[in-house]
Image (cartoon, rainbow, N blue to C red):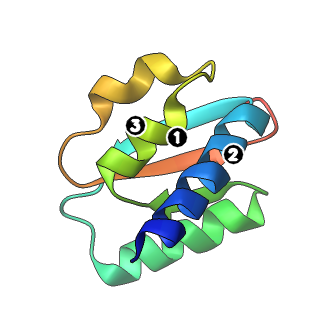
Amino acid sequence: MNRKQKEELVESLHKTFLNSQSIIVTHISGLTVSETTTLRSNMRDANCKFKVTKNKIVKLALKKTKFEYLDNLFTGPTAIGSSEDAI
């Protein structure tokens, strides 16, 4: 991923955090590919998003959002669940 792609991803995630009513941070170690695929499908069916991404990129995207305090949760293999509806 080049610098421009990283900047676009940070901006996209930042918009997700600004538009979301709820964020779930999960540590995904131990999930199989099949389980992850099922989880993504279930979340999509519930009108939610699920994204595995690099912690450094997420920490940049969290800045100046109401979820900025979550930055210390991004260590190790993590994923973000988000919804524009309150859960």
Q: For the residues carrying marks 2 and 3, which lies nearer the camera in this image?
A: 3
Hey, what amino acid is under mark 1? Ala
Vertical relation: 29 (above or below) 11? below
Write the residue at 48% across / 48% down: 80
Q: Quadrant of residue 21?
A: top right
31 displayed left or right of 22:
left
Write the residue at 38% across / 74% down: 35
Is 36 or 76 nearer to us in this picture? 76
Q: Badge 2: few (under 14), some or many (20 or more) residues near its Cα, within 10 Å?
A: some
Distance (Cα) linking label 2 and label 3: 13 Å
Which mark is first along the chain, 2 or 1?
2
Quadrant in the picture for the N terminus: bottom left
- Farthest residue toward the front? 3
Which mark is first along the chain, 3 or 2?
2
Q: Badge 1: few (under 14), some or many (20 or more) residues near its Cα, within 10 Å?
A: many
Q: For the residues carrying marks 1 and 2, which lies nearer the camera in this image?
A: 1
> Where does label 3 land, which residue?
59
- Residue 70 in sight in this render: yes
Q: Badge 3: few (under 14), some or many (20 or more) residues near its Cα, within 10 Å?
A: some
Hey, what amino acid is under mark 3? Lys
**Residue 71, percent from left and from top:** 37, 27
Q: Are marks 1 and 2 in contact (CB under 8 Å)?
A: yes
Q: Are marks 1 and 3 in contact (CB under 8 Å)?
A: yes
> Where does label 2 land, which residue?
16
Is 71 or 57 nearer to us in this picture? 57
> Where does label 1 land, which residue?
61
